[in-house]
Image (cartoon, rainbow, N blue to C red):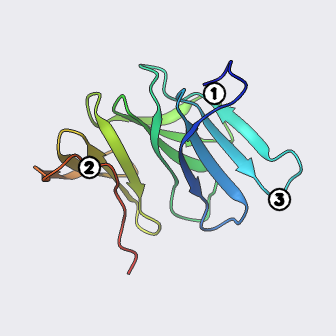
């Protein structure tokens, strides 16, 4: 919601490896990376969701020691893989759900992620973009996905 003098965060994630890094997704489809260890705080701004601009419903850092790679999902159904070192390009796009993506979870240790939809589907993907599985007909729309870390 730019133009009103403020922006509304719709999703956020903190790096589990590098303290101080925070990724935030916004209602206007933008993604911003912040670093609490520097005075400027804002590191970069990207607009990865360009097909149909809708709010970012999930964001997370990829597992591993490389904190420059972020996964962002928009309500339009696309999942974008971003490398903040190259702010102009997305290096991978998954069209996960058609206009109904509601949740994203990136596993902290394994190279997988899950996305949920209002159409009662949960899809599991590798970080290479391959769909690994589908869980169908959840009783209600999926608004939160998470991994059991035990």
**Percent position (x, y) of residue 92?**
45, 37
**Percent position (x, y) of residue 27?**
52, 31
Dot placed on the residue nearer the N-terminal end, 3 or 2: 3
Give the Cα distance between marks 1 and 2.
31 Å
Dot placed on the residue nearer the N-terminal end, 1 or 2: 1
Circle 2 is placed at which residue position? 142
Circle 3 is placed at which residue position? 37
Residue shown at 44% from the left, 26% from the top: 54
Give the Cα distance between marks 1 and 3.
24 Å
The image shows residue 112, relative to residue 9, as above or below, that is below
- Left or right: 114, with 9 as reference point: left
Most extreme residue toward the right is 39
Dot placed on the residue nearer the N-terminal end, 1 or 3: 3
Mark 3 crowd level (few <14, some 14–19, many ≥20, 10 Å Cα): few
Residue in the foreground of this view, choosing between 68 and 32: 32
Query: CB under 8 Å between callouts 1 and 3?
Result: no
Circle 1 is placed at which residue position? 88
At mark 1, the secondary structure is loop
Residue in the foreground of this view, choosing between 95 and 122: 122
**Residue 150: quarter of image:** bottom left
């Amino acid at each position: 919601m730019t133009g009103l003098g403020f922006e509304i965060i719709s999703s956020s994630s903190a790096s589990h490896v590098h303290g101080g890094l925070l990724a935030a997704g916004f209602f206007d489809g933008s993604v911003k990376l912040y670093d609490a260890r520097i005075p400027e705080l804002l590191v970069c701004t990207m607009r990865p969701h360009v097909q149909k601009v809708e709010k970012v419903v999930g964001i997370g850092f990829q597992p591993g020691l490389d904190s420059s790679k972020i996964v962002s999902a928009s309500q339009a159904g696309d999942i974008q893989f971003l490398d903040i070192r190259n702010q102009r390009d997305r290096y991978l796009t998954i069209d996960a759900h058609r206009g109904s993506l509601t949740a994203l979870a990136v596993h902290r240790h394994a190279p997988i992620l899950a996305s949920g939809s209002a159409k009662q589907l949960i899809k599991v993907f590798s970080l290479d973009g391959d769909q690994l599985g589908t869980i169908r007909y959840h009783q209600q729309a999926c608004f939160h996905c998470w991994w059991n870390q035990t």
